[in-house]
Image (tube, rainbow, N blue to C red):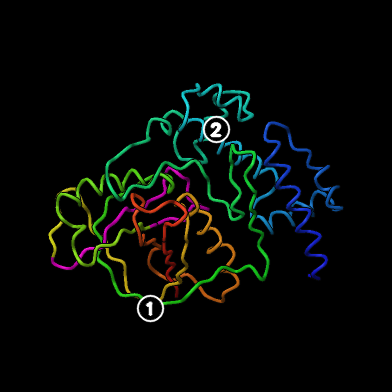
Amino acid sequence: MKAETQTFYEAAVLRTVVQISQTLDQALDLAALARGAALSPFHFHRVFRGMVGETPLEMHRRLRLERAARALLTSDVGVTAVAFDAGYETHEAFTRAFRQAYGASPSAFRHGVTDPKTGCVRPPQAELAAPSGVHYCDDPTRVLTVHIATKESIMHVDIETKPALRVATVTHVGPYNRISEAFARLGALAGPAGLFATPAAAMVAIYYDDPEVTPPEQLRSDAGLVVPEGVDLPAGLGEQRLPAGRYARTTHIGPYTQLGDAWSRLMGEWLPRSGQRVGEGHSYEVYRNNPTNAPPEQLHTELFLPLA
């Protein structure tokens, strides 16, 4: 694609993203958006999805759902009112869409919030993974940052050979963005047992399923703590082995709420262009600092993807 053509399409996509984010309470005029980009609706959707990772309508619906999830977490507004605000005509339709996105009903999502006193907590998360990094925000003064996929925008990834790891785990079944519940249970069990004081201690999350093809309520993951061989595990903790092998590693600096976006870019942007293939084993995250004493923008997380 010529540079001037790419710039034209990028500008059209950015205008559309801004319009979507600022008009969540209005129905999208898809034909008007396409005319603004001088494209047919069919071709505009393909260009938009290729650069942003979702269609305009998908982005509009996701941002409305994120706004609804934020309301459930931060207010006592009734679920029916939240549903109407999200653009749904019935409580039932909203509940179906919300459960499909978050793996739980709106009421269960609201009441599932925990406030554990442990250093391995991840906060409740309203954001749904998006390669573009565009999420609902109620601050009208914020500067909108949009990640647009181009050939030059591949994230930095290193390929490393990693040793095998023994991990003490608490299992989580459900949306990956609610794994904080399992970390709370892990902290309550591992802390009194002194496992955080072992030399090898490192917090990890292990992911077993592909969220693109597995319903959110069926996603399997583990909140884990790396432990040395021979250390006894207290009752309630399971044990997993992360095999030695080749892994793609990328580093995310910033809030845990953006980790889903980082995974989307790693799998959807870097991997197809890298010439690498996914291997046996499981993807995992390693947390290099602690959310209790580091601000969200300085949290350091490493993402590991097994390679063949």
Q: Quadrant of the C terminus?
A: bottom left
Judged from the image, the secondary structure of the residue bearing numbered disc 1 is strand
Residue of label 2: 68
Specify the segment rendered in magenta.
207-230
Packing grade of label 1 (10 A; few <14, some 14-19, many >=20) is: few
The residue that appears at 71% across and 45% down in the rendered structure is 18
Give the x, y percent position of residue 51.
69, 58
Question: Total label count?
Answer: 2
Seen in the image, is 128 located left or right of residue 230? Answer: right
User: Tag 1: residue type?
Assistant: Thr
Question: Which image quarter: residue 139?
Answer: top right
Seen in the image, is 243 located left or right of residue 38? Answer: left
Does the magenta run of residues contain 202? no
Depicted 125 relative to depicted 205: above or below: above
The residue that appears at 57% across and 74% down in the rendered structure is 274
Residue of label 1: 161
